[in-house]
Amino acid sequence: MWKSRLPVNVLPAMVASAALMACTTVAAVSKAPEDIASSLKLPPGFKINTFAKLNPAKGDYFRGPRFMAFGPDGNLYLASSVDDTVYMLPDRNHDGVADEVVTAVDGLNAPNSLVFVGDIMLVANQDGVVRVETKDGKWPARKLTPLISGLPTGGHTLKTIKLGPDNHLYLNVGSSCNVCVEKDPLRATILRYTIDGKPAGAPDGSVSGARGAVWASGLRNSQGLAWHPGTGDFYATNNGADMRSETKGGAMNDELPPEHINHIEPGKHYGWPHCWGNRFTDPNFPGKPGFCATTQPPAITLRAHSTPIGITFLDKTDFPAEYKQDAIVALHGSWNRVEPYGYKLVRIRFKDDKPVAVEDFVTGWQTRNSAWGRPVDVITGPDGALYVSDDRAGLVYRITYNKK
């Protein structure tokens, strides 16, 4: 049976009535403080400042400033699903603050992320991927050409695209539901394509279409994708199901199921919708007998409903040496807990190239049952700083380390 790694004092917060269950919502919106830097707590020697201000999410929807990428021009680009736009955030004088917010691409369809393949920008809309074309390299974009089309929408509809070290494109497709058996085989997966947009789901990189584009499955919503700088191992965050219990017909348990950081391998199944944690079978949606024993357990778990999204390794930061082998994960924060949790950045400690522990890195967005910010993505800039997007406050932060 799955056993939580959490200390006893945070385990089973059982909810015994439907009335209480209905109260499980996202942390209430609170006003962003005037002094952002002093309101966030970081380890000694680290500093955070506001790099850019954009449009925040509308209400509590998961839409606003989302995933980021640095372009070959050294500028930061950011997808804003609330505006159907990709923005460029240049810092020409290198003072750690964006000079302006430039519309790079508009007329998109709930874009969640973007990636550069050489000089070419690709944007992940909710229904596919488009190639961005400019005139003389100037923004805004002149033309959008479909590269990957027909991806399923609705449910967990936002898509993340990354370029892997194998020069292939990786794309997540979330589930259509909380817990169900999907009819569409593209749902709850990570897909793999060539940079020309051809399906390459086979481990040998074949584009014959024999296996289509599916690289890994059983992943309810894996928006954060990253590769270990030393081993090349592929890691992805994943959001577990809501309103679960460890007993059949039991009350919802705030501390179940754990969130996963998964080591992604081709052709493997990661448990959803029937399993969580160390191959624990959901007693209220068990699937076929023995199924969970065939699935891949997580590399490490996080507290339930913390909603891990963006993940990045720290090897290219100017952080202290003891951070270089580790990763940072953005916890977007719960929406379905009686006691809200998340709304912070955590450090995933690695030892011998394996994740072994989780600890807080930046906190302060949440105050009791309200939160003024919800971190989404984390990436390293060419300046060695860590950049963080926040779709609730509509901000991008920049984290640096004072070597003195």
Image: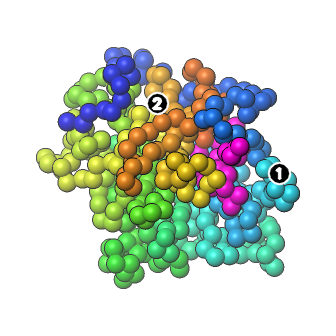
Residue 332 visible in the snapshot: no
The stretch in magenta equals: 376-404
User: Residue 294: where, in percent of width, then height?
Assistant: 19, 54
> Mark 2: which amino acid?
Asn
- In the image, is 256 to the left or to the right of 73? left
| 190 is higher (above) or lower (below) than 38 | below
Residue name at image x 77 percent, y 56 percent = 89
Query: Can you tell which quarter of the image residue 113 is in?
Result: bottom right
Asked if the stretch drawn in magenta spans residue 386, the answer is yes
Q: Secondary structure at mark 1?
A: loop
User: Residue 40: where, in percent of width, then height?
Assistant: 66, 31
| 286 is higher (above) or lower (below) than 86 | above
Residue 336's label in the rendered image is 2
Asked if the stretch drawn in magenta spans residue 123, the answer is no
User: Residue 244: where, in percent of width, then height?
Assistant: 33, 32
Nearest the viewer among 208 and 384 is: 384
Residue name at image x 39 percent, y 22 percent = 10
Give the quadrant of the C terminus. top right
Question: What's the distance in space between the residues labelled 2 and 1, CA to CA?
Answer: 40 Å
- In the image, is 145 to the left or to the right of 281? right
Residue 138 visible in the snapshot: yes
Q: Nearer the viewer, mark 2 or mark 1?
A: 1
Instruction: Give the colouring mode of the picture.
Output: rainbow
Q: Secondary structure at mark 2?
A: loop
Give the quadrant of the N terminus. top left
| 49 is higher (above) or lower (below) than 156 | above
Residue name at image x 39 percent, y 26 percent = 254
Residue 95's label in the rendered image is 1
Residue 167's label in the rendered image is none
Count of numbered circles in the view? 2
| Residues packed near mark 2 inside 10 Å, few (<14), some (14 to 19) or many (20 plus) | many
